[in-house]
Image (cartoon, rainbow, N blue to C red):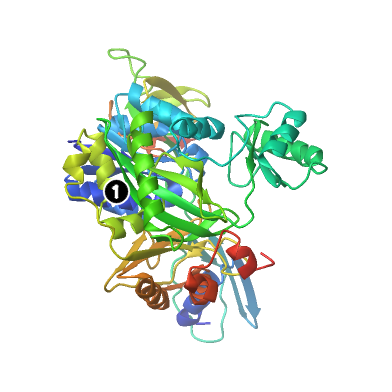
Amino acid sequence: MNQKEIKELIDLLVEKDIAEFELERGDTKIRIKRTQQAVAVSGAVFSAAPPVALPPPAPPSVPAAAGEEGVDLIKSPIVGTFYEASSPGAPAFVKQGDTVTVGQVLCIVEAMKLLNEIESETAGEIVEILVANGQPVEYGQPLFKVRTK
Amino acid sequence: MFKKILIANRGEIALRVICACKELGIKAVAVYSEADRNSLHVRFADEALCIGPPRAGASYLNIPAIISAAEIANVDAIHPGYGLLSENANFAHVCETSGLKFIGPPPEIIRMMGEKDKARQAMKRCGVPILPGSDGVIASEEEAQEWARQVGFPVIVKAAAGGGGRGMRVIRSADELPHMFSAARAEAASTFGNGDLYLEKFIERPRHIEFQVLADEYGNAISLGERDCSIQRRHQKLIEESPSPSVFPELRKKMNAILEKTMKEIGYVSAGTVEFIMDEDGSLQFIEMNTRIQVEHPVTEFVTGVDLVKSQILIAAGARLSEIITQPIVPTGHSIECRINAEHPEKFTPSAGKITVFNAPGGIGVRVDTAQYQEGVVPPYYDSLIAKLIVHGKDRPEALARMRRALDMFIIEGIYTSIPLHKRILQEPDFVTGNFDTKFMERFMPKK
């Protein structure tokens, strides 16, 4: 099976909206799995023909992953304004390098005059704070990068 | 004049409001759910904010999220479009208390017209003919029997708190009444959380005729004529046109005059649509009022030359009607709209997915209002309307020919659409002669 055949196969799966596909033909075995919008191609392809370079598997787009190993993104659950502390002048809830636990309050997102405390869904170390104090944030906007244990 | 408006809607109507904003030099702020990230209304807005997940309840119907977005984007006003929050009196009120101008009528008017029996009473007091029926909510089955006797069978009982065909039963005799009455009550209670019913005369072969009104904040109002929306399936409109083949000039003139006076008396502001049933004898009887811009507004725009959405914005910004409509309206020609839905043309099952080919028709007298495009995705979370095809001709025969031509040139592939259905309706003799009522679709497609 060459690169062109694999591409045609992928196009066919996308067109017919097939989520998973496995084929064994002689020495060739291929498994294709579609995750959300992306296609992940895996499985060793043994062929009597000269080996061809496979296109690298497309990374599946999973909402929580930051694309790095063991790093989670904490995202805003509402649209509003990000505040790092409970009130002006108060110390920030967390800073870079802090270790946080599940349920720990990380910040406030203010919406319609209501100060919503945003709790961490994961335990680990704050690797990076992605927004500035007082910045407007959207629903789903990444706020913190947390390296999980 | 407003500097920035937030559009609390999606799809083609959000784009429609963006068009009006661009032409008025107002910045448009779009809000979107995660499912609409690649939407055209997001692309063409000046700013866009993601406000929630795909589910409408958590995004487009989420009042705190919308107000929050309006605050951080620092907008002056909110246009609610149609559907969604456009007739939510509470939302209009929250906008006001948040210092945002709601582009529409005052909350009290929205609330009054949203309660169907209150709306009927208000219109009756102003001399608008209403469909004979109960004076408000019916307290008991005995009362229902008495009203039915007065009005005359057949009657229909309807949910005071709802619409869309739920909590409704047609009752043809006193014997049937007890059983139908309790069935309607139970359905209304479970659908809307309120089992209150009112009763109306039931007309077997009605036409659906609605009038477009526009009013400013200074007590001036104008009625811009009617649209005929009788071609419906399960209370969902498929085709609309203006003028109605059943409305003669004297009736139009009389209704325009009554409605202008009525809108002034009730203190209506902004655009609205007053819906009537036309009885078999040709008389018009009020059923309800929609206090927002409607899907089929382009039909009236074509015939009158009035930009209704721009008018809404200007009125909300304090303009007088005389500054917006500077010449007498002379309705010209004939306009027809087909609602193109993403659904199977015979089974009517919704068809979500990716559009692989999208070729919209153009040419003289053709308008397409759509937020879809080639490679665009129709998400499964929202209603199935993906485009409106509107034509204008010098008379009805030209409009019909133009619509047929335009439908032939409207190519959408990758999903099912109602285009084949519209093409068939446009060939149907009863439609061509203008001889139809709201039962047209039942006769046209008997099993559906």
Say left or right for B53 vs B27.
right
Image coordinates for residue B88, horizontal then vertical, percent = 46, 33
Q: Quadrant of residue B269?
A: top left
Say left or right for B236 vs B171.
left
Query: Which residue is nearer to you in this view: B341 or B302?
Result: B302
Task: Indicate the chain on which mark 1 is placed.
Answer: B
Q: Secondary structure at mark 1?
A: helix
Image coordinates for residue B4, horizontal then vertical, percent = 23, 38
Q: Quadrant of residue B144?
A: top right
Height in image: B178 above or below B448? above
Q: Residue at x 64, y 64 (%)?
A: B442
Height in image: A6 above or below B12? below
Where is mark 1, residue-wise? Answer: B308
Query: Which residue is nearer to you in this view: B414 or A98?
Result: B414
Q: Residue at x 51, y 38 (%)?
A: B57
Query: Which residue is nearer to you in this view: A8 or B235?
Result: B235
Say left or right for B27 vs A128.
left
Q: Total of numbered circles in the picture?
A: 1
Query: Which residue is nearer to you in this view: B46 or B266?
Result: B266
